[in-house]
């Protein structure tokens, strides 16, 4: 029987899923939530609180420890890891790990009996990794764009403007602010390639899917762009391996994992990719024509693209499609953290949150509109946390919990709708994934705001599923449609149809929301 392991190292947790491609069954899945299982890292939500809201960092050793925990959890659950025929994975995009020695110097194995984190700690040239929520590099973005001839050239080469959270601007800031540590850095990894390298105990290259989120990849050439490398940091080209296609067989699981967790000797690894590209696979959406909304720590909207096309408004990105070609994406930073913040202020658990929306409030929320921005926002570009409220003066979370719950979700859906045009043509069905897609009230609001049928899949965690399917496709050569029919089936029992009678309400609210966003952007919340 053919079992494949998919891993997903995301902002708040690390997940693992084992699929059996013969039976079409999910054999097991486990999730290690960093804040719960590894509280010693001081990162309750997966990143370290920082006095500056624009600086967001995580400890890569936390990811390494979580990797050992999740594999131990699978074993403890009775999963026979010796049956795994291939492993791949995904990582939160854009985050970077800095190493003083290339992981190739590790030589393909870790010392037995010594925890991995203790072996990797001395290799780091920077203790903390900037992650995708960091928005502190506006200056570096402007410098990079100026050095290569302007924003339009960065967009033409990489598919995105120079973007604060993207790896190139982050590398530039590090090299400028800590030149000695940059000098000591021998190798830079993305979260995805770092996790793959840990498993291989040697340096695994970045894939084209995730590599496109760095402001360094020449999309047309599928290679690092010489002018961008040069504009970013001295000697950067020597610190990155050439990027590889996502289906590349990049090595073998180190014997350390074979001995400790019972994998078969010489278990092969496929290149890891970004969580969103991996999710494109896990949603069965690698061909154009499917639109996906992912509701996680970040909310994203993405779709496969026939030809690379750039966002005239500067928000959208072009990443690599792991099945070949490209994908379009927009990303909203105020996803689950904003929903959780409102739920907390309103004193609601998720059941009460959903009930408040469905039973105690009506579409349009009596005209109450929230600007749902609690951390610096990517789409639209807003520098400061700016919880702003419109409507009745008394409308404050805590005083009207149900209305607050509806307000945050309606505003988030309107924000996605406002900015999603670049990603794909209006469709009558939208696939939905991510933790919040379990919530029927959120699906109802999405259906009504987008006037589209909202369809979750039967198997959750599309990013980890996508990783397992990529491993299966690479090693077994099974066609994508065969894998999708087994693991990406819609859950029609939870699908939600739009209510046409709500259309006018959301047109009116959407117009007000767009006006308010324009006002915020014009009034100095914008960074540059
Ligand atoms: C995408 C992005 C986020 C992270 C979160 O551009 O920044 O969706 O990938 O995991």
Image: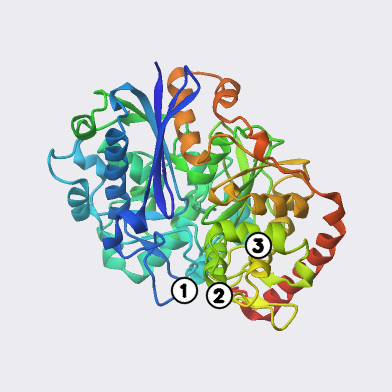
Residue 107 appears left or right of 185: left
Quarter of the picture containing the N terminus is top left
Residue 499 appears left or right of 45: right
Of label 2 and label 1, which has the lower sequence position? 1
Q: Quadrant of residue 433?
A: top right
Of label 2 and label 3, which has the lower sequence position? 3
Labels 2 and 1 touching (C-beta < 8 A):
yes
Quote the CA–CA distance across marks 1 and 3. 31 Å
Name the residue that disc number 3 marks: 356
Secondary structure state at the residue bearing disc 2: loop
* Horizontal and vertical percent position of residue 314: 66, 59
444 lies above or below 272? below
Secondary structure state at the residue bearing disc 1: loop
Name the residue that disc number 2 marks: 385
Of the numbered discs in the image, which one, if any, rests on residue 343?
A: none
Count how many numbered circles sit on residues in the image: 3
Quarter of the picture containing the C terminus is bottom right
* Horizontal and vertical percent position of residue 24: 50, 22
Quote the CA–CA distance across marks 2 and 1. 8 Å
């Amino acid at each position: 029987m053919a079992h494949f392991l998919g891993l997903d190292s995301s902002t708040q947790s690390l997940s693992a899923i084992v699929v059996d491609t013969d039976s079409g069954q999910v054999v097991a899945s486990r999730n290690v939530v960093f804040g719960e299982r590894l509280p010693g890292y001081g990162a309750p939500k997966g990143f370290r609180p920082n006095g500056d809201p624009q600086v967001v960092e995580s400890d890569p050793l936390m990811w390494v420890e979580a990797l050992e925990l999740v594999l131990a959890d699978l074993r403890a659950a009775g999963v026979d890891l010796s049956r795994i025929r291939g492993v791949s994975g995904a990582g939160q995009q854009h985050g970077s790990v800095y190493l003083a020695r290339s992981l190739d110097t590790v030589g393909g194995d870790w010392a037995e009996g010594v925890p991995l984190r203790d072996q990797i700690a001395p290799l780091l040239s920077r203790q903390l990794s900037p992650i995708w929520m960091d928005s502190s590099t506006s200056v570096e973005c402007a410098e990079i764009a100026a050095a290569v001839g302007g924003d339009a050239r960065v967009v033409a080469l990489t598919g995105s403007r120079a973007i604060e959270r993207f790896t190139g601007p982050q590398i530039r800031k590090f090299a400028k602010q800590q030149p000695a540590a940059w000098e000591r850095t021998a190798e830079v990894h993305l979260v995805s390639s770092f996790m793959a390298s840990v498993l291989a105990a040697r340096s695994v290259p970045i894939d084209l899917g995730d590599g496109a989120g760095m402001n360094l990849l020449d999309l047309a050439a599928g290679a690092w762009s010489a002018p961008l490398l040069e504009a970013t940091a001295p000697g950067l080209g020597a610190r990155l391996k050439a990027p590889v296609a996502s289906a590349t067989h990049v090595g073998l699981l180190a014997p350390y994992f074979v001995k400790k967790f019972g994998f078969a000797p010489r278990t092969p690894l496929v290149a890891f990719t970004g969580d969103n590209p991996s999710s494109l696979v896990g949603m069965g959406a690698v061909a154009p024509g499917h639109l996906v909304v992912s509701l996680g720590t970040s909310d994203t909207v993405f779709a496969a693209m026939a030809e690379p096309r750039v966002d005239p408004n500067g928000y959208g990105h072009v990443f690599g499609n792991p099945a070949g070609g490209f994908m379009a994406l927009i990303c909203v930073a105020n996803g689950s953290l904003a929903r959780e913040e409102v739920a907390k202020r309103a004193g609601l658990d998720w059941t009460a949150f959903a009930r408040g929306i469905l039973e105690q409030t009506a579409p349009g929320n009596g005209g109450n509109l929230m600007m749902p921005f609690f951390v610096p926002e990517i789409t639209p570009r807003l520098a400061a946390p700016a919880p702003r409220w419109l409507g009745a003066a008394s409308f404050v979370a805590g005083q009207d919990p149900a209305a607050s719950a509806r307000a945050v979700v309606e505003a988030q859906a309107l924000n996605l709708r406002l900015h999603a045009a670049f990603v794909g043509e209006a469709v009558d069905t939208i696939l939905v994934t991510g933790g919040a897609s379990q919530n029927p009230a959120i699906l109802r609001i999405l259906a009504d705001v987008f006037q589209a049928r909202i369809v979750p899949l039967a198997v959750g965690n599309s990013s980890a599923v996508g990783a397992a399917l990529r491993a299966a496709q690479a090693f077994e050569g099974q066609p994508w449609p065969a894998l999708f029919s087994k693991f990406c089936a819609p859950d029609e029992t939870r699908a939600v149809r739009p209510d046409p009678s709500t259309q006018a309400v959301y047109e009116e609210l959407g117009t007000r929301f767009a006006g308010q966003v324009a006002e915020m952007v014009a009034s100095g919340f914008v960074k540059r």
